[in-house]
Image (cartoon, helix red, strand yellow):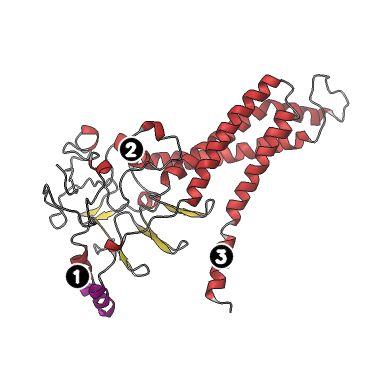
Amino acid sequence: MAPSHVLRCCQRGLSWIPVIFINLVVGWSYYAYVMELCIYTIPNPEEQVIYLVVFHVSFVMFIWSYWKTIISRPTNPSKEFCLPKAEKEQYEKEEVSEVQQEILKRVSKGLPIYTRTGGGAIRYCDHCQVIKPDRCHHCSTCDQCVLKMDHHCPWVNNCVGFSNYKFFVLFLGYSMIYCLFIAATVLQYFIKFWTLCRRRAAENCPQNQLPDTHAKFHVLFLFFVATMFFISILSLFSYHLWLVAKNRTTIEAFRAPVFRNGPDKHGFTLGFRKNVKEVFGDQKRFWLLPIYTSLGDGHSFPTRLVNIDPEQLIVDQPNSKGALGGESMSNSHNHLLDSSGADGKPPADGGTVTVTVENET
């Protein structure tokens, strides 16, 4: 049997196959559209220029957001969520799960953690040996815990989570625009080439018809590929827009996060506008750019709880410090919370909005 590290290297190499496939398809689509369609087929220079300008804008934004999703490394829990040496040794020696939970509760008391396992226990990763922050999950493919993990995407060979979720949504949006623009502009030439192929045998092709060249195969195939990808991406993009509006991850959509008082699928919902800001940031001029603008630090999130958790509620103190060596949530996150609930309105279910932020004034 081959050494385990050799198997891991082979697995990592194979995991790049979907990315290589996507880049080959995109590279061919660039050649087919620019050279075979715009240069060799379209006779009108003004139409060529307009098509090339719009095409390259959508192409650049698509490639930019796609590679930002790929190269953005998943963020992991900070060292504050690791067990201290003494507690870690005690936890590993202990065989009784109840005693282990007591150790975890004692360590996590100063951490901004509000979610639990389905059985109400502290969420702990035995593999990474860290207490899991809220919305953090272990990815078996990446072999690490990922903050605000959404899913592992083979098409980008990366985990989609807190560090790159905005890039992923933009990648879906721009890829859909890219495919839609190609399909819409190629359609008229697709019809002409298709008509040419049908009339060629009868030798009665009109003089204003396009010439019978090898470009027709690129144009015909380009339309089919662009249409197919557009249809498949449309449903995925719509689904993630819905997740952003609800402030949920794919994991939370299938399994509601569990708080001390039970599961609550609306636990992280702050209202539409604030949900969008949490992913895309405060400044709207940067929303459509693949630039990191998401709010927060990935370890703690504004939480809308139905009932106050007496064990986790932190009393506001003007000069107090958070458990992470500072504020438990960034200043850009603090304003997402207010006493009246999401968007200045009471919670839809009549619950209480709980501010779980230190140094809040």
Mark 3 residue crowding within 10 angstroms, few (<14) / some (14–19) / many (20+): few
**Horizontal relation, residue 340 to residue 7: left or right:** left
Give me the residue at 53% from left, 68% from top.
Answer: 8
Give me the residue at 81% from left, 33% from top.
Answer: 213
Image quadrant of residue 295? top left
| Helix, strand or loop status at disc 3 | helix
Residue lying furthest right in this view?
203
Q: Earlier in the sequence, mark 2 or mark 1?
A: 1
- Residue range (magenta): 85-100
Q: Position of residue 181 (x, y in %)?
A: 59, 30
Q: Which mark is residue 277?
A: 2
The verdict on residue 95 being magenta is yes
Looking at the rendered image, the disc whose residue lies closer to the viewer, 3 or 1, is 3
Looking at the rendered image, the disc whose residue lies closer to the viewer, 2 or 1, is 2
- The residue under label 1 is which amino acid type? Glu
Towards the viewer: 140 or 2:
2
| Helix, strand or loop status at disc 2 | helix
Q: Which residue is mark 3?
A: 11
- The residue under label 2 is which amino acid type? Lys
> Alpha-carbon distance for marks 2 and 1?
37 Å
**Horizontal relation, residue 161 to residue 102: left or right:** right
| Helix, strand or loop status at disc 1 | helix
Q: Position of residue 210 (x, y in %)?
A: 79, 25
Mark 2 residue crowding within 10 angstroms, few (<14) / some (14–19) / many (20+): many
Does residue 97 show up?
A: no
Q: Which residue is mark 1?
A: 102
Q: Earlier in the sequence, mark 3 or mark 1?
A: 3
**Horizontal relation, residue 66 to residue 284: left or right:** right
Q: Position of residue 68 (x, y in %)?
A: 49, 46
Q: Quadrant of the N terminus?
A: bottom right
